[in-house]
Amino acid sequence: MRSRFPGLLALLTAALCLAACYSTKPYYHPKERTWQTRQLPLPQQPVHTLYLIGDAGKPDSLPLEPGLKLLRQQLRETGKNGTVIFLGDNIYPAGMLPEDHKDRAIAEQHLNTQLDAVKDYEGKVFFIPGNHDWNKYSAGGRAAILRQQAYIEAYLGRKGVLQPPNACGDPTVVKLADDVVLIMLDSEWYLHKWKGEPGINEGCEIKSRHEFEEKIQELIDEYDDQRIIIALHHPLRSVGEHGGYFSIKEHLFPLTHLDEHLYIPTPLLGSLVPALRYLGISAQEIPHPKNKKLVNTLLDATFKRGNIVFVSGHEHTLQYFEDESILSDRHFIISGSGSKSNYVRRTPKAEFATSAKGFARLLFYADGATWLEVYRPLGDGSEGELIYRRQIKSPDLSLAPLEDPVPLTIDSVVDRAGDIYEAGKGKQKFFGKLYRDVWSTELKFPVLDLSTHLGGLTPVKKGGGFQTQSLRLQNPEGKQYVLRSVAKDVSKAVAGFFPIAPENSVIREIIQDQIAMSHPYSAMVVPPLADAARVFHTNPTYYYVPKQAMLGDFSEDLGDQLFLFEERPAKDRRDVASFGRPKDIESTPRVLRALHASNKTEVDQQAVLRARLLDMWLGDWDRHDDQWRWAEFKQEDGKRYVPIPRDRDQVFSVVNGFIPWLLTRKWGLRYLHDFDYDTRDIQGLNYNARYFDRSFLTAKDRNAWMATADTLRAAFTDSLIEAAIGLWPKAIYELHGPEIIAKLKARRDRLPELASRYYHFLAKEVEVMGSDQNERFEVERFGGNQTRVRVYRLKKSGEKGRLIYERVFHYPETREVRLYGLNGEDEFYVSGTAATGSLLRIIGGGGKDRIIDESRVGGGKRTLVYDVKGQNELQLGREAKDKTQLSEAVNAHDRKAFKLNHLLPLVLPGFNVDDGFSLAGGFIATQHGWRKEPYKSKHSFLASLAFSTRALDVKYQGDFTGALGKLDFYLDARAHAPTYVVNYFGLGNETRYTEMNDDNFDFNRVRMSGITVFPALKKSFNEQQHLLRLGPVYAFTRVSAEENEGRFVVQDNSLGAEAFEPKHYAGLQFNYHIDAVDNPVFPMRGLRFNFQTGWYTNLRQRNMQYTSLQTDLAVFFSLYAPTLITLGSRVGYARNWGEYEFFQAQTLGRRSNLRAYRGERFAGDAAFFHNTDLRIRLFKLNNYYLPLQTGLIAFFDYGRVWLAGEQSTRWHRGYGGGIVISPYSAAVISATYSLSKELNILEVKMGFFF
């Protein structure tokens, strides 16, 4: 059996590789194989049809590519209620060339074939740019886009065909139908190297990638109630080459990626090109960091949204993916085979995929349904074949009344907020008393009759967040109101954090149970308290909403529930005094855009401060950006925005019980705040507002904070508090009313101290923002430690206008002030003298800026200037440091860059055959700083003790980002206690292993102590995917003969007495590490590579010096046949040259590379090993307590060592198998049984062997 196992595994491996070969047949996901039975909803006709064709810029056939001929035919049939969009790469290979270029006529011909197909079309025609249109994604791309734009407009006689226009990053929005909007993006603008494009953003609204990201979020919010189509050249998902999936051809003939005619076979070496593409060597590949940033920007903006369709080209294939879940309803279409075709992987990750040429179309129906169809041409394109059809959006549920409304006959109902939160004493001890009694108390509620209330309310839109269902209503005057369910459903939250968890699981029950942390009637008492604080507010009331005709199709889902009813803060609300009677109300993203666009727009920061102190007093921890709306007021020379807080679900929330207490420590869910007599964690309380506060509280100094806190403390009188809490029904008041009153009074008395604590936290780093207009920033250093910042508008004449910002900063209260000019031609003037002062960063922004520094501050340089090199006027004195760069990225501003420092405690149990049971404890401390990614510093400390050997191992790793300019500093230190243990069986490939080794594990154990220190320079690439380290190393090791008495190491005659003397080694070491796998827990695709080399010398015996090398490469490859099967293969080699100690030999064994053998079983000058894993995913166990993903693993290892003078041809082999479980898909636990000629080993561990 043993001899047959490796062969069987090899056969399976070969089958796995062969199954990955190229296939031209369309792939259909198993659930899509009946697609041909789907029929369009005839006789209904679509209100609009959108045709999608991409990468049509290199037609094979003239005068018309078959796919274009079929497209033209279908466009004629569709008529004017249609749109066609060419999804980029409209001209191969390098876009529209200059008129005097020798290949200009070819470029025109490639484009003309597409233009001729649509020249006479009466509907809408759009082209978007691709990477080849940008001069094959190289310098001169902007000019090529402008040439293509001019040529298209002249040829078609139409304006606005190439979108977005003028090589800008500004998204273009086009309405296709009443509820269908098309957003067109230039993804190559985002991915392009801007250094080679001077003036790339001239005349554009969007000046930076960050502004682009903000604009995308704004557009998604604006059109949230419509069907949104987002068109861009580069796909977000793909099972083609740009997604990291390659055919055998790409491994054998990789040069065809550069030139399709270069069929030069390069086996093995050729696999390097696909590997580099998978690693994201080019921004055109999805794994590239810049590409991933674009993908994540779009995915984050559309997270928890519905009705989103992404359409792309780039891949010369036709693909469709769905992301239809409880959280999101997004669809991804690739239609990039207009003139070329490429490999696409057949995998269930896609619903449909084919390498055939063709195009897709979307059909939009009046009832809200959307259908996708994919066609390929037959022959010359006179006919076509439908190869896929799918309804990607169902018809909308009707909001119209089901029947003529009849007034309800009941006016009140007895109900309770929730009936699932009652718990016995045991459950309360572990999961908290919370507000369970409040939720389960019955009350009488008025009934809401939509047909009569406020003149009659008509449903407009159904919505809701992670936990709440909501319904937007409108009265006959057009004023809108909102119903929000009191009952919460955590299904979306569970799906977000634990996607594998079934609907009925203990984790869902626990999360649902903790809803009782919140007080269901807290919102009722907030209005009078907000009035006292002079803070705008909604006016919530509670109603029972029975099923009724006015709810339309939503009656079944929303009827017979308890709801909170309030005014919707949107548009013109001059009818609501508690909103300030504004003519318009805006969202936070729109206010931010308005502030950036004009320096005549301002936020009432004093009103923000009052509102935020009210939040902290009430313990309202959920105050993120979307929890605010802004009342807009016109003033003499601009606009002023005043905040309107909304959604008071978390006021008075409590955290008690052991489990909630444990999970809400600073290292856990610290934002879940316990409303108590004092505030333990002020940063945790305000965690969800961390971006909000740093945007809208920048002008207020400590005096303003303390004065406002004192004013509010005086306003929150005992009688006010008692009256507000007294608004609760008697049954609710009696449960917690007196306690909450006492807490509010205690928190009121501590409000100045609370304000002071949070002010000091915010004041450490402050960002002062300009706008896209012209400003003058004046900075004055004065006194012992003060810095005054004033910002003025700049008039067209260049004179100072109105003062729009002023604040005095005190060091060390404020350690850093950042001035962002944003766009426009800004002036920065720094003057004055001070003994010390805050670090000043000037980030000039787009436009030609003038920066002058004449200041004097004690200590090092305290003014750092960031802007584009060579485009600005700089007059920098000795206090300033020029940090300008060629890249536009130097001016980027990310308001969401702030991160809290974090301390994570660690407790890690373990077991293995050599060390027995072990326990490790330690921590990971992470600190963050400005433009330090992924952190400013990270400290990892771990101490482990093996109980059977009493071995103690202490490790420390320190990582300091940008500590030495563009280089990081890295420190690795390790100390072994006197009983630290490794194994020693002698040197050589055929050392003996007898029953004595089995019976007495201690016989081969070597007790030793030591210290290793490795300080190094570090450089990382591609978001830590590549790591390089270089530095000196020091190692002390002591092996005591007395402590190892009676063991093999003392009896080995090949070791002399000097082997037991203390050893001091120093040297130089270099490490290179690549980690490019798709999933760090359960890798299915990708590779990991390690390389280390070093030179080491004995500081007391200079003749004892050696050079070492260790390297290994692990690759992972998967396919579905029919379940997920992953092949993992790792090969490694190591070697020493020179004179080394026995414990410095290269080894094979269970700890690192050869399962089924003791750790360090073989040692010698050199070592080679090969590990092969076959990992098979089985099924999910959706049990109540612990949902598990299960799997099997089979493995085969072999390897050997070499020793000078030894003649050996033996290879050591081991094999085995086991089971794998993954709780909640968050971690992997593997249990394996390994077999070899020497030993059979059972091992349970976290993760895989490699």
Image (tube, rainbow, N blue to C red):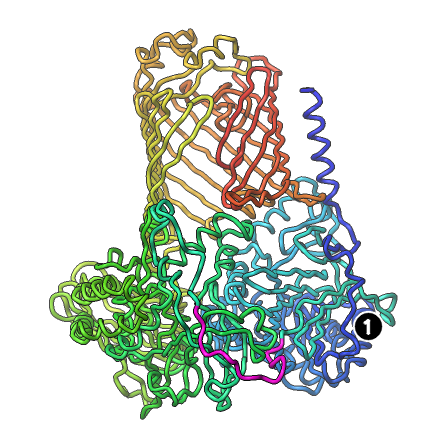
The answer to whether residue 192 is left or right of residue 271 is: left
Q: Amino acid at mark 1?
A: Leu
- x and y percentages locating residue 86 in the rendered image: 69, 73
Locate residue 916: give its quadrant: top left
Estimate how packed mark 1 is, as few (under 14), some (14 to 19) or many (20 or more) residues with alpha carbons within 10 Å.
Answer: many
User: How many numbered callouts?
Assistant: 1
Look at the image and tell me in which quarter the N terminus lies: top right
Magenta residue check for 722: no
Inspect this view and state whether residue 1221 appears.
yes
Q: Residue furthest bottom?
A: 636
Residue span colored magenta: 398-414
The answer to whether residue 371 is left or right of residue 514 is: right
- x and y percentages locating residue 1112 in the rendered image: 54, 34
Write the residue at 35% across / 18% down: 1007
Residue receiving disc 1: 70
- x and y percentages locating residue 616 in the rendered image: 27, 66
Write the residue at 72% across / 65% down: 390
- x and y percentages locating residue 60 in the rendered image: 80, 66
Compared to residue 60, the image places residue 116 above or below, namely: below
Could you say which is closer to the camera, residue 733 or residue 84?
A: 733
Q: Residue furthest front?
A: 409
Could you say which is closer to the camera, residue 989 or residue 489?
A: 489
The answer to whether residue 450 is left or right of residue 260 is: left
Element type at mark 1: helix
